[in-house]
Amino acid sequence: MSRSAPSSQSSRCRDLLAGVGFVVENLVFGLLPKIGRFLPGRAADSMMGPLQDKLLPGDVGTAVVIAWAVVLGVVGLVMLKRRDVS
């Protein structure tokens, strides 16, 4: 019985999350554009200019992306503090 290397497990997890995020984000944006435009991918799209009428203005999209980064960073720090064994 062989074990997978940690790097292959983490890459599979990353690929799964990226795939699910891509699918879910597009579905939410397609079905509920007023909510979906606040997800990180569509907010980042709006930073490049309003390519679609449903996207946020560029400055609002930038603020949303920064907010996502701050929230996810805080969540990561909290998880690190709780799980750190040293």
Image (cartoon, grey):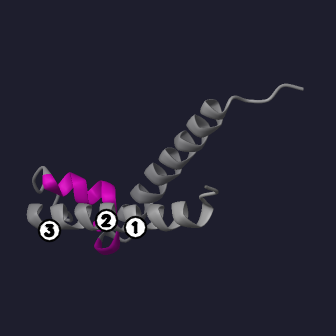
Q: Where is residue 65 in the image (x, y as percent from the top left)?
A: 25, 61
Amino acid type, callout 1: Val
Residue at the image position 65 percent from the left and 37 percent from the top = 9
Q: Where is residue 73 in the image (x, y as percent from the top left)?
A: 38, 61
Work out whether mark 3 precedes mark 2 in sequence or the reverse, and give the earlier one. 3
Q: Is label 2 in a helix, a strand or a loop? A: helix
Residue at the image position 59 percent from the left and 43 percent from the top = 13
Q: In this view, does 23 lie to the left or right of 9?
A: left
Check disc 1 and report the residue beneath it: 74
Amino acid type, callout 3: Val
Q: Which contiguous range is marked in magenta?
A: 34-47
Prevailing SS of the magenta stretch: helix
The answer to whether residue 82 is visible is yes
- Magenta includes 45? yes
Q: Which mark, residue 70?
A: 2
Please, which residue is most extreme toward the right here?
A: 1
Amino acid type, callout 2: Val
Q: Which mark, residue 60?
A: 3
Mark whose residue sits in front, 3 or 1: 1
Quick one: label 3, few (<14), some, or many (20+) residues within 10 Å? Answer: some
Q: Is label 1 in a helix, a strand or a loop? A: helix
Separation of marks 3 and 1 at Cα, in angstroms: 21 Å
Q: Pointer 1 and pointer 2: residues touching (CB < 8 Å)? A: yes
Q: Is residue 4 left or right of residue 22?
A: right
